[in-house]
Image (spheres, helix red, strand yellow):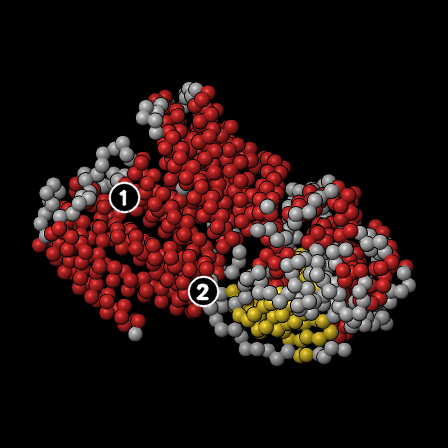
């Protein structure tokens, strides 16, 4: 897997590879290029990946080695079940006092699948993501993540999830290198300097690794928070407006980076206003309004309809 | 039905309190050293006992509330803590009056009085915390945590204050009670217990009603447009 | 052990952040000294009452400074919702508790380095070297006794609007045993211990610490999780 950073130009080092179909989730939808609904086709990407020398930390995801065919089986961790659907929500609702921020939400996401949450501000996208992350408990309905009840199996479910929200959960007084090293060690892994450098390079921050995060621009902080996700190796990634606070080069980097994650079989739930960037990354989409699902269908259809 | 049972037993409790107080005030003998002032014991000691019972119940409810997550246990917790706080406050007032009459001072850092004061502050703090928390779920778990920690603290405070005071004179609260005084004491204790149970359960029901009034049913389900997979 | 490792990492992270933001830590230390000075003004310039009350003043200065330190410990986590990130890593809430409580206890221990010399000067104390060592030990026990319930309540009140008033309101009645034990024991060290009570008071403080550190650790996950 090539190192993707804005510095190496648009896309990964392998973008010259002609086996990649145009619009396979790597670029924002250009006029005339219609992304196929199954844009994250494992067969092609599996073949593509087998060509690259995969770093050690990719090997934890057997699907990424190119088993091809069916959706990649993610079985990295012993504890988190791999073939169960990533997410099953039924009648999910959340109340704050009298106000139902979310109600009657039914969702289903297969392992490795991707879902776009669209809708105006205040429609409940952030609440839904926080519910999925287990940081809120549902007031109504049921939720199963990886086939498990997030309240009963908190640790297991959380180890399979990652979330990057508006708040990036960074410590302003730590440097980027220290942040990544801390994250590695919290998971019980060693934090050798090369590993940290590798991660910094992926985010395009290797020149600023020893600067306190508080001095970073918003875009740099976002990239650091996203690259931290690599350390967590989630089965499901939850993102709340990831394209905000990024300039167009940053957005291109992010789209590429997310596409890479999808190829590895990481599931994605993405809440975004930036449909032209986010819709190509996702198979399905739902539109929320006033806390309820008003539309669901393929992400491409949503994009066509204009959001 | 359960509701009726508690109400009737509360009336019986009031009757017991009336009888017990009458006996205590007029029939039981006066204490040797303190005279008639000692008769305040017939409300003071039951207040102390039943206050402790209330807080113990609150402790149990707090544990169940955290364990089960069901809000009804939080309602019961509120009932028990509030009745306990009221009894505790009354206890302090009675103790102060008694102290004034026997020792000449309104406050003397007596072991039990001091412990009661700290206990009052602890559980009043739980009630204050409830006011400050806006979210229902947080309110329930935080009240339970504060109640458990506070309750565990009470014996520690008691022993600590006792050691703290050990060089000072031991107060003249009677440890052994004349048999003639036991009857009104027990009557009052049982009576107060029944009344306290009734008050706590009413308060719990009130809290439950308030909780439901503050919430709302979910809105009607909106029909969603489903576009088939391509 | 995973819990211990994560707690240690959190502790180290907190120390590093405290060091980087040490202007704030220095302010807390100065606040402690100011408190000691204020007690002198409250009691008058006579040396004898000040000497007799020294243990109490030291303990109170520790208590009042602790509130500032404890609030700070969680403010660090609130800044960018860093706490959420930690919990989702996932970090065991219990590990988070012990890491943060250790960090707070360490900060309170630092206070001793500043406050004890200040008290010795202001209140004209003359402790023996052995006495100073005993004071250090007692201070450690008192700091631990404040840090554990303080961390639990700081986690709760940190989320409230009125956090600066709520934390002392909840914490101070709770730590009355630590307060009494610390004052009594330090007083015995500073003014003499004719009846050899120091050992029992020290054991009392240690017992409180053991109870608080276990009970608060068990309850912390309930305080920190949304529901």
Q: Nearer the viewer, residue B209 or C27?
A: B209
Mark 2 closeness class: few <14, some 14–19, many ≥20 residues within 10 Å: few
Q: Callout 2: residue from which chain? A: B
Q: Quadrant of the N terminus of chain B?
A: bottom left
Query: x, y (%) of residue A249?
Result: 80, 55
Quadrant of the rendered structure where residue B72 is? bottom left
Looking at the image, residue C205 sits to the left or right of residue A300; the answer is left
- Residue at 82% across / 67% down in the picture? A43
Q: Earlier in the sequence, mark 2 or mark 1?
A: 2
Element marked by disc 2: loop
Q: Which residue is mark 1?
A: B112
- Residue at 77% across / 70% down in the picture? A70
Q: Callout 1: residue from which chain? A: B
Mark 1 closeness class: few <14, some 14–19, many ≥20 residues within 10 Å: some
Q: Is residue C145 above or below residue A304?
A: above
Looking at the image, residue A83 sits to the left or right of residue A277; the answer is left
CA gap, disc 2 and disc 1: 35 Å
Q: Which residue is mark 2?
A: B70
């Amino acid at each position: 897997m090539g190192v993707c950073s804005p510095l190496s130009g648009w896309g990964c080092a392998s973008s010259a590879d002609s086996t990649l179909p145009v619009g396979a989730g790597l670029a924002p939808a250009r006029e005339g290029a219609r992304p196929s609904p199954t844009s994250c086709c494992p067969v092609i990407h599996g073949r593509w990946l087998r060509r690259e020398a995969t770093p050690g930390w990719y090997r934890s995801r057997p699907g990424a080695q190119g088993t091809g065919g069916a959706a990649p089986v993610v079985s990295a961790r012993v504890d988190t079940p791999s073939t169960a659907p990533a997410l099953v929500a039924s009648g999910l609702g959340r109340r704050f006092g009298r106000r139902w921020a979310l109600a009657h939400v039914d969702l289903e996401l297969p392992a490795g699948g991707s879902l776009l949450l669209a809708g105006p501000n205040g429609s409940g996208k952030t609440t839904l993501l926080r519910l999925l992350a287990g940081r809120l408990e549902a007031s109504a309905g049921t939720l199963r993540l990886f086939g498990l009840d997030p309240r009963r199996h908190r640790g297991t479910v959380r180890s399979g999830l990652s979330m990057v929200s508006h708040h990036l959960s960074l410590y302003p007084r730590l440097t980027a290198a220290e942040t990544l090293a801390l994250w590695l060690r919290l998971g019980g892994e060693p934090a050798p300097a090369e590993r940290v450098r590798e991660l910094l390079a992926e985010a395009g921050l290797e020149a600023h690794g020893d600067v306190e995060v508080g001095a970073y621009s918003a875009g740099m902080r976002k990239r650091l928070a996203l690259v931290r996700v690599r350390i967590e190796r989630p089965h499901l990634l939850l993102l709340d407006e990831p394209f905000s606070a990024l300039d167009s080069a940053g957005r291109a980097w992010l789209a590429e980076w997310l596409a890479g994650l999808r190829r590895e079989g990481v599931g994605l739930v993405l809440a975004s206003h930036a449909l032209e960037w986010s819709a190509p990354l996702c198979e399905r989409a739902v539109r929320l309004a006033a806390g309820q699902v008003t539309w669901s269908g393929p992400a491409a259809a949503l994009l066509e309809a204009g959001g | 039905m359960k509701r009726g049972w508690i109400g009737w037993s509360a009336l019986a409790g009031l009757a017991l309190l009336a009888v017990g107080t009458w006996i205590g005030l007029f029939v039981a003998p006066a204490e040797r050293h303190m005279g008639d002032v000692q008769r305040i014991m017939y409300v003071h000691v039951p207040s102390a006992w039943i206050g402790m019972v209330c807080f113990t119940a609150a402790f149990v409810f707090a544990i169940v509330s955290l364990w089960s997550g069901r809000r009804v246990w939080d309602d019961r917790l509120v009932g028990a803590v509030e009745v306990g706080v009221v009894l505790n406050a009354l206890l302090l007032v009675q103790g102060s009056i008694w102290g004034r009459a026997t020792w000449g001072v309104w406050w003397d850092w007596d072991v039990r009085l001091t412990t009661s004061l700290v206990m009052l502050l602890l559980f009043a703090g739980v009630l204050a915390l409830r006011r400050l928390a806006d979210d229902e779920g947080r309110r329930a778990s935080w009240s339970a945590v504060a109640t458990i920690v506070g309750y565990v603290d009470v014996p520690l405070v008691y022993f600590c204050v006792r050691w703290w005071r050990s060089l000072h004179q031991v107060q003249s609260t009677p440890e052994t009670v004349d048999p003639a005084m036991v009857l009104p004491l027990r009557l009052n204790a049982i009576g107060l217990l029944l009344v306290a149970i009734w008050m706590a359960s009413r308060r719990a029901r009130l809290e439950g009603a308030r909780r439901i009034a503050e919430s709302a049913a979910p809105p009607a389900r909106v029909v969603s447009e489903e576009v088939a997979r391509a | 052990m995973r819990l211990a490792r994560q707690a240690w990492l959190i502790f180290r992270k907190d120390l590093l952040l405290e060091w980087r933001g040490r202007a704030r830590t220095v302010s807390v230390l100065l606040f402690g000294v100011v408190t000691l000075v204020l007690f002198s003004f409250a009691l008058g310039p006579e040396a004898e009452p000040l000497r007799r009350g020294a243990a109490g003043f030291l303990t109170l200065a520790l208590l009042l400074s602790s509130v500032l330190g404890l609030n700070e410990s969680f403010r660090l986590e609130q800044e960018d919702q860093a706490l959420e990130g930690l919990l989702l890593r996932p970090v065991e809430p219990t590990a988070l508790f012990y890491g943060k409580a250790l960090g707070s206890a360490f900060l309170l221990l630092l206070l001793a380095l500043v406050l004890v010399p200040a008290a010795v000067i202001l209140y004209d104390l003359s402790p023996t070297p052995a006495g100073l060592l005993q004071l250090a030990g007692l201070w450690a026990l008192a700091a631990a006794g404040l840090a554990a319930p303080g961390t639990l309540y700081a986690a709760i009140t940190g989320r409230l609007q009125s956090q600066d008033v709520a934390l002392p309101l909840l914490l101070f009645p709770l730590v009355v045993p630590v307060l009494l034990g610390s004052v009594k024991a330090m007083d015995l060290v500073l003014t003499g211990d004719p009846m050899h009570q120091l050992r029992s008071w020290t054991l009392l403080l240690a017992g409180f610490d053991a109870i608080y550190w276990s009970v608060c650790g068990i309850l912390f996950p309930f305080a920190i999780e949304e529901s």
